[in-house]
Image (cartoon, rainbow, N blue to C red):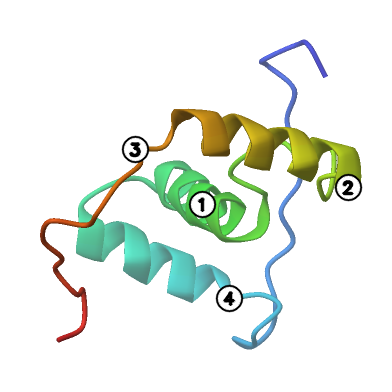
Amino acid sequence: MNNSNENILVKFRSKDTQFGVTRATVKAIAKELDINETQAIHMALSKFAADVLPAYEADDGPLTVKQIKLLRDHAGKNLPKGKVMSRKDLFA
């Protein structure tokens, strides 16, 4: 779908449900927001996309045992050593 002028037919429901709305509902939303019906539909789809689609790409899954060992070795070499001089608890 590279063509930005592609259109889609929207068939409205005969009554409002969780799976669709009536044309009257779209008109009421558009009127309330002082926008046209097309903008109201785009706003609704944009909100739905934000709720449904992942916000980031999936990662490679859990770390391997080898990766965890490397991280622990690296942390052990780079974390400060010695006596703790002060401490604050997050939930005191």
- For the residue pair 53 and 60, the one nearer the viewer reads as 60
Residue 40 in view of the camera: yes
Residue 41: numbered disc:
1
- Which label's residue is closer to the chain start, 3 or 1? 1
**Label 3 packing within 10 angstroms: few (<14), some (14-19), many (20+):** few
Find residue 75 and report its image quarter: top right
Question: Disc 1 or disc 4, which is closer to the eye?
Answer: 1
Badge 3 marks a residue whose secondary structure is loop
Badge 2 marks a residue whose secondary structure is helix
Percent of width and height locating residue 30: 33, 58
**Image quarter of the N terminus:** top right
- Residue at 65% x, 84% y: name it: 18
Please name the amino acid that badge 4 sits on. Answer: Thr
In 3D space, how far apart are the residues under numbered discs 3 and 1 (Cα atoms)? Answer: 56 Å
User: Are the residues tagged 4 and 3 within 8 Å (C-beta)?
Assistant: no
- Which label's residue is closer to the chain start, 1 or 2? 1
The residue that disc 2 covers is 65
Find residue 67 and report its image quarter: top right
**Label 4 packing within 10 angstroms: few (<14), some (14-19), many (20+):** some
Question: Disc 2 or disc 4, which is closer to the eye?
Answer: 2
- Which label's residue is closer to the chain start, 4 or 3? 4
Please name the amino acid that badge 3 sits on. Answer: Pro
Question: Disc 1 or disc 2, which is closer to the eye?
Answer: 2
In 3D space, how far apart are the residues under numbered discs 4 and 3 (Cα atoms)? Answer: 64 Å
The residue that disc 3 covers is 80
Residue 22: numbered disc:
4
> Measured along the vertical axis of the image, is residue 73 above or below residue 87?
above
